[in-house]
Amino acid sequence: MQAVSRQIGTLNVHTRYLVSAVDDYLDSLKATLPESITNIVMTCSGSEANDLAMRLAKQATGGEGFIVTEDAYHGNTSLVTEVSPSIIKQGKLPAHVVAIPPPSSAVYGEDIATGFAAKVTEAIELLWERGFSVAALLVDTIFSSDGIYTEPRGFLKKAVDVVHNAGGVFIADEVQPGFARLGEAFWGFDFHGVTPDIVTMGKPMGNGFPMAAVATRSEYLASFCSDVGYFNTFGGNPVAAAAGQAVLDTIQQENLQTNALVMGHYLKTRLQSIASQSAYVAEVRGQGLFMGIDIGKADNKQIPDPLKTKQVINGLKAAGVLIGAAGRFGATLKLRPLLTLTQSEADFFLDAFVQQV
Amino acid sequence: MQAVSRQIGTLNVHTRYLVSAVDDYLDSLKATLPESITNIVMTCSGSEANDLAMRLAKQATGGEGFIVTEDAYHGNTSLVTEVSPSIIKQGKLPAHVVAIPPPSSAVYGEDIATGFAAKVTEAIELLWERGFSVAALLVDTIFSSDGIYTEPRGFLKKAVDVVHNAGGVFIADEVQPGFARLGEAFWGFDFHGVTPDIVTMGKPMGNGFPMAAVATRSEYLASFCSDVGYFNTFGGNPVAAAAGQAVLDTIQQENLQTNALVMGHYLKTRLQSIASQSAYVAEVRGQGLFMGIDIGKADNKQIPDPLKTKQVINGLKAAGVLIGAAGRFGATLKLRPLLTLTQSEADFFLDAFVQQV
């Protein structure tokens, strides 16, 4: 907050005028990314970032097809809505978009990596039959709106290899998992040990200040910019850079990635213990401070119960805890606290939660 | 700046949690809009706003066709780039988009209103021939990137009537002209005495804070939302509302609309006097604090001279004035100073400018 106020008090302009604060921030951000990802375009929102990422993927591959998960959400622009099945209420996906089931053991059994990759292969073939070659596999690397899936670590690698072999690129949507939340890694793709071709980021990037970005290989941007220009009034303004730098500095100085790891482990252990004794809590998934808690029916907790989930949400709200639901049935609680979470805050939540389940 | 800092220090959340500061701001904003425009969706950028506006227009009309001006710029998303000829370097517009010449006397002669409306009629017929019915006429109401065209006041009315009679809607892109800049009116459509069906706004809305919006009739939003959901993490956050409210309050308390009128009149009169004595300044157009200055060749100033324009821009930069170029040839200086412009600041610019031309 102080960083934003200070920079607003100093100077706020768009990127047609170059400002060193922006360069410095981009250097800091690049230091967190793979070496092959050398270029960053700042935007205002994750939606704008994914919109641009999709166009970069099409330009880079010559393909038109996109593979996403069944309950994915990638943003609100026209193009991005096409690859966001979770927000489409009427009608179906366009022919150039194929949605595959999320990487859950319920769908793929024990070998999620192989099963998920096989579905990607099927999707590529289906796109071919429809006359499209694949442009990209686009996934939120923690599959947040699908219900949060992180295990087994590394399962994404086979699917990414399949897409690369078919000439497509891998877009890692890090809007939700990115910025140290997973504890084990700064980014979701890092957690899985894969190198994306395009990375999109947003939400936590400015800790509430509206900012987002696309990071990619330089050749993808060069090719794109020869056909259309791209300018973003607010994207990359120095106030955003100040907010973004403050976020990176705070993560480092306050060891928030380690805190996410430690507190995430504590929360998950306690939640799994609660699950083992609860008639409603079917499963606890996730990594670091990003967890999904499946709520099921009292007589068989393996059957998702959206009504009970709503009751838990309202009960927690009355107790002073705000939480939302995700997943196909709206029966997965999405637990995503502040990275600064303390043990007493975690206990406050756990005490409130155990009353509900 | 103080308003932003205060709200950041208090609370910053997204619109899933309702905050009275946001409601109050939306009421203030609605008070500036026509009575028929009852609903506002907050977004992060003008691009997101125009992206949503285009989808609302398609949903409301069942049409797919868009009519824009030849050098229009409406934003950077995939959908909006399709209607932004000025940013497309390679290839042509898609078949469902028809670009018409901007409302200049060079194109339409003395009766710009009739000529421009006739071009809209032609565009509607061309869309029909291509198999599309018209969804919307979408124009920046000051035609900024086309070169700034405001005269004669009211010329838009005939074109809007033509679109309405064909079943299309009129989208007023107020990202550049809106928020009191034109002096005579708070919005560009108001200046022309027309009532839009959809209004988009951005840039000056938060005075540098990234925020934008779509305002429209309630029935258009209701229809759209029955098919897809729309959520925007940063759009409508209380910090944006605080920034937006501060902008509206400052415009009112400091009489900035009157200042735009008075200082705009002063600037235009002085610039026209400079033009009459200059070998390079061909024409001065515009309204309030938004003017276009055509720069031409020394031997015939009616011929646009982008090179001389660049020299003027660099000369002004050396003198401490930042200015950009617009229009088909990049030979129109786009003069758009702060709404707080004082006479001594205006004189500072005029003194620097007269040295260059």
Image (cartoon, coloured by chain):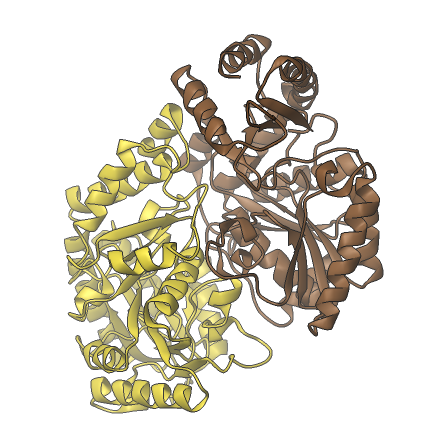
Chain colours: A brown, B yellow
Q: Is residue A315 above or below residue B287?
A: above
| Residue at (31, 55) in percent of width and height | B222
| Residue at (73, 65) in percent of width and height | A126
| Residue at (35, 34) in percent of width and height | B4
In the drawing, does residue B325 fall left or right of residue A179? left
The quarter of the picture where residue B237 lies is top left
Between residues A339 and B169, which one lies in front from this camera angle? B169
Between residues A332 and B326, which one lies in front from this camera angle? A332
The location of residue A44, given as percent across then percent down, is: 49, 48
The location of residue A12, given as percent across then percent down, is: 44, 44
Q: Is residue A77 above or below residue A174?
A: below
Outermost residue, front side: A299
The location of residue A308, given as percent across then percent down, is: 48, 27
**Count the marks: how many?**
0
* Residue A32 in view: no
Between residues A296 and B207, which one lies in front from this camera angle? A296
Q: Is residue B317 above or below residue A291?
A: below
The location of residue A326, given as percent across then percent down, is: 54, 36
Q: Is residue A18 above or below residue A268?
A: below
In the drawing, does residue B196 fall left or right of residue A237? left
* Residue A57 in view: yes
In the drawing, does residue A131 fall left or right of residue B303? right
The quarter of the picture where residue A322 lies is top left
Between residues B60 and A328, which one lies in front from this camera angle? A328
| Residue at (55, 45) in percent of width and height | A212
